Amino acid sequence: MMCLIGCVSKHQKFYKNYEPTESPCIDGTILNISNSTCNAVYMNKENEIIKLRCANADIASWWNASSFYVVRSDFDKEISPSWVLFCVDSGYAVFTQEYSAQLGYP
């Protein structure tokens, strides 16, 4: 808990307008994207999948060069074979796909 309190005071800009989802995977992913020199986090929901990614970054990093896909833990549809499981909690699973994979590069 002490680490979380320290992070909140250090990253007040992020927490001012953010309302936690009660999912450690979603909140942690958004926090890490935001803190990786990302100036704007893109979120889009299509069908039952939420896509998260950095829309504008000052410096390239893995966090802002990857896309993240959020589905409910009980999601039973096929997912892209290029997605890699990143995080699972009691309600959601987060998958990642690096930008190079999105462009068709190995």
Image (cartoon, grey):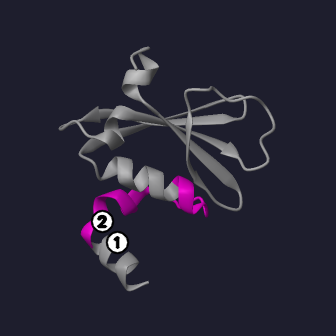
- Asked whether 16 or 3 is in front, the reply is 3
What separation in Å lies between label 1 and label 2 (alpha carbons)? 6 Å
Q: Badge 1: how crowded within 10 Å, few (<14), some, or many (20+)? A: some
Residue 90: percent from left, percent from top = 71, 62
Instruction: Say the numbered circle drawn on residue 54.
Output: none
Locate residue 89: give its quadrant: bottom right
- The residue shown at (29%, 32%) is 56
Label 2: how many residues lie within 10 Å, few (<14), some (14-19) or many (20+)?
few
Figure check: 59 above or below 104: below
Closer to us: 35 or 105: 105
Look at the numbered disc 2 and give the secondary structure of its residue. Answer: helix
Q: Where is residue 101 drawn, in percent x and y? A: 44, 23
The amino acid marked with disc number 1 is Val
- Disc 1 to disc 2: CB gap under 8 Å: yes
Q: Say which residue label 1 marks.
A: 8
Rendered location of residue 33, percent (x, y): 37, 47
Residue drawn 71% across the image and 57% down it: 91
Q: Is residue 66 left or right of residue 75?
A: left
Q: Pick out the residue farthest to the left.
A: 59
**Is 24 rendered above or below residue 80?**
below
**Residue span colored magenta:** 10-26
Residue under label 2, please give it. 12
The C terminus lies in quadrant: top left
Q: Tell me the quadrant of the picture where the N terminus can be found.
A: bottom left
Residue 70 position in % (x across, y down): 61, 42
Q: Is residue 38 magenta?
A: no
Quarter-of-image position of residue 46: top right
Instruction: Identify the secondary structure beneath mark 1.
Output: helix
Say which residue appears at 61% left-offset and 64% top-offset. Answer: 22
Residue at 66% across / 34% down in the picture? 49
Look at the image and say whether residue 22 sits in the magenta stretch. Answer: yes
Amino acid tagged 2? Gln
